Amino acid sequence: MTREEVKGLYQQYVVGSYTRDDVVLVQGRGSVVRDMDGREYLDFFPGWAVSGLGHCPEGVVTALKKQAGVLLHVSNNYYHPWQARLAERLSRSSSGGKVFFCNSGAEANEAAIKLCRLYGRQHNRYKIISMENSFHGRTLATVTLTGQARYSLPFQPLPEGFVKVPFNDFSALENAVDEKTVAVFLELIQGEGGINVADKDYVSKLEQFCRQRSILLVIDEIQTGFGRTGKMFAFQHYGLAPDIITLAKTMGGGFPIGAMIARSELASLMVPGTHASTFGGSPLACSAALAVLEMIEKKNLTVRATRLGAYLQKKLVDLKKRYPVIKEVRGLGLMLGMELDRPGAQLVKLCREKGLLVNCTHERVIRIMPGLTVKRGEIDRAISILDRSFQEFVALT
């Protein structure tokens, strides 16, 4: 097939709910992907961090091949050892508790919302607070939870009981809480919202406030989890003990899987019949996730994310010194953003034309999140492309 034939089939048969760049990708390994014409790109935003260990990580590919010949799927009416082992690993590497498995971040947050509501029934509470500019998914409940009205406005009327407050503003949150508040959802680094990092003092006050009022604290680690920020999970930078954690993206190394981890006494509220996910926690998905955890541990990828993240951030700061169009560089580990003083879509296009894939979110924030296996030389190449792209971008805009 030609590129135009592929695009033609998409136009004819695929729902047009995505904005797609004019690239047809057919192969990937590590930080490099290739299109149908054989052109290579450095992928510094691999699938919104789904390919967080790079494309086709060897350990995950091997695990999937092996598991595919043994057992693909069984109903959650039965036990299987891969889900048992993965639940143990996730619990021990996070804050303890029990795990519910699903297929995506939105599903993980749906499960968390339902668990919060189950908890709230005991106290006649149901309201959930989330942050402005947050992003928690595309289902009706999670898009309502999301703090960006553009995602939810077309689907009104929306479910009740969701309240938004400014990010990093403790007074606003304190004032928003009432006798019906049951939980607070928080991304410690807002990804889709523009790589906004939570202040440690704010998080400390928030945790203490929630504990005093028996309000559940839910940490959305869907984009920050599995080594991205230099710790296995971002909440570990803050010394937090969340009531609920939600996970997905990098968790499967490219294969779909999500999870919610909840304190054991809280998890006990989910009795048979309260929630389910047909494909959640299949042997195939769990094998992929186990391989991801194995790779992170054996290759010291959290340490690597800290070291290479600092290197990349310094290079981006150097660009900022040369190009005043860059207002700020921020982030943690290998989750970085450059805020511009103007829309950044044209810069993304220029980078793509030169062989670098990045993302623009919140209209003006260039999001850079390479796989944790990225090489220093690949970072240098990416910076060179960004440098040349900024030269053209400034001249054009």
Image: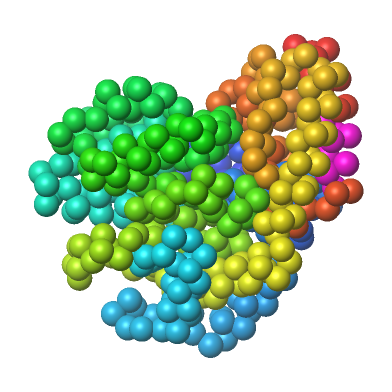
User: Is 32 inside the magenta-drawn segment?
Assistant: no
Please provide percent x and percent y for residue 171.
Answer: 35, 22
Tell me which corner region of the image, top left, top right, bottom left or bottom right, holds residue 387.
top right
Classify 319 as above or below 21: above
Of all residues, the one furthest to the bottom in this rendering is 70
Tell me which corner region of the image, top left, top right, bottom left or bottom right, holds residue 290.
bottom right
Please provide percent x and percent y for residue 190.
Answer: 52, 36
Please provide percent x and percent y for residue 329.
Answer: 70, 27
Q: Residue at x 30, y 65 (%)?
A: 264
> From this viewpoint, is residue 3 visible?
no
Q: Left of 1 or right of it: where is 96?
A: left
Q: Left of 281 or right of it: where is 141?
A: left
The colour mode here is rainbow
Q: Residue at x 68, y 45 (%)?
A: 334
Q: Left of 172 or right of it: where is 310?
A: right
Secondary structure mainly formed by the magenta segment: helix
The residue nearer to you, when weighing 243 against 66, is: 243
Q: Residue at x 28, y 80 (%)?
A: 77
> From this viewpoint, is residue 334 visible?
yes
Q: Which residues are magenta?
A: 378-386
Classify 73 as above or below 126: below
